[in-house]
Amino acid sequence: METELKLAVSVEQVEAIKKLSLLQKYGAGAVQERHLVSTYFDTPALELHEQKVSLRIRDKEDGWVRTVKTAGSSERGLHRRNEFEVPLSKPELDLELLDQLGIEVISQAIRQHRLQPLFVTDFVRSLWILEAPQGGSVEFAVDLGEVRLYEPSDNVSVSPISEIELELTTTDEHADPAFLFLLADEIRAAGIEITPDDESKAARGYRLNAVL
């Protein structure tokens, strides 16, 4: 189970975020930076999207990861979804292993040879690991980049990515998100304007696809 709080933030405030005292207060202040490029797949009729399932391959610079997320909840920017990840030796879906997940909408698309790439998220992630006072840790990520269609269209612009993701590292479905909201309060107290964001990167890609 993935539990994360997503917060929209302006590009102009990113440098201030990187200087927040909470990064030292709860962590070592050490940042990791990665360029992440993910390709999302669905059927021409967007059947995965209709079932609130997402399927992607992410290039993490040092290898590829295939991720499937199933239906979950989203409220006040807090997202909870079941997540299945597997490393890949090459940027291909590995349909046999994918079928073994037992997610019917994906299995049916595989049988009918209808999976295709739809859109790409391309962003740089700055990541800090923070320790919660009550135990456990949180990934504090700042993402800057864009969402674009897999096959570009002159009629469709890209959708910018400028957000903070606060994600619990535990996958316990009963994990307490209280520390995520505490971090959000401390960000606001530092004078940075943030807004809870219920729209995922994948949702932005589908929104681009819908205007074709």
Image (tube, rainbow, N blue to C red):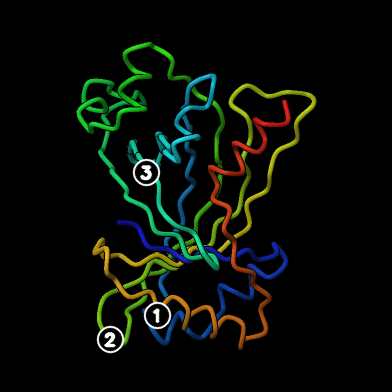
Tell me how far mark 3 sits from mark 2, CA to CA. Answer: 29 Å
Q: Position of residue 4 (x, y in %)?
A: 42, 63
Per the image, label 2 sits on a secondary structure element best described as loop
Q: Is residue 28 above or below residue 31?
A: below
Q: Position of residue 58 (x, y in %)?
A: 41, 38
Disc number placed over residue 73 in the picture, else none: none
Q: Position of residue 87 (x, y in %)?
A: 26, 37
N-terminal of the pair, mark 1 or mark 3, is: 3
Tell me how far mark 2 sits from mark 1, CA to CA. Answer: 9 Å
N-terminal of the pair, mark 2 or mark 1, is: 2
Q: Is residue 26 above or below residue 93?
A: below
Q: Residue 154 versus residue 197: which sits nearer the camera?
A: 197
For residue 132, what is the image quadrant? bottom left
Foreground mark, 1 or 3, reads 3
Residues marked 2 and 1 touching at CB (< 8 Å): yes
Q: Is residue 26 left or right of residue 162?
A: left
Per the image, label 1 sits on a secondary structure element best described as helix
State the residue position of label 1. 179
Q: Is residue 199 above or below residue 12?
A: above
Which residue occupies 38% across, 74% down?
Answer: 177
N-terminal of the pair, mark 3 or mark 2, is: 3
- Count residues near mark 2 (Cα–Cα under 10 Å), then give few for <14, some for 14-19, many for 20+: few
State the residue position of label 2. 134
State the residue position of label 3. 70
- Count residues near mark 1 (Cα–Cα under 10 Å), then give few for <14, some for 14-19, many for 20+: many
Quadrant for the C terminus in the image: top right
Quadrant for the N terminus in the image: bottom left
* Circle 1: residue type: Phe
Which residue occupies 37% across, 79% down?
Answer: 27
* Circle 2: residue type: Gln
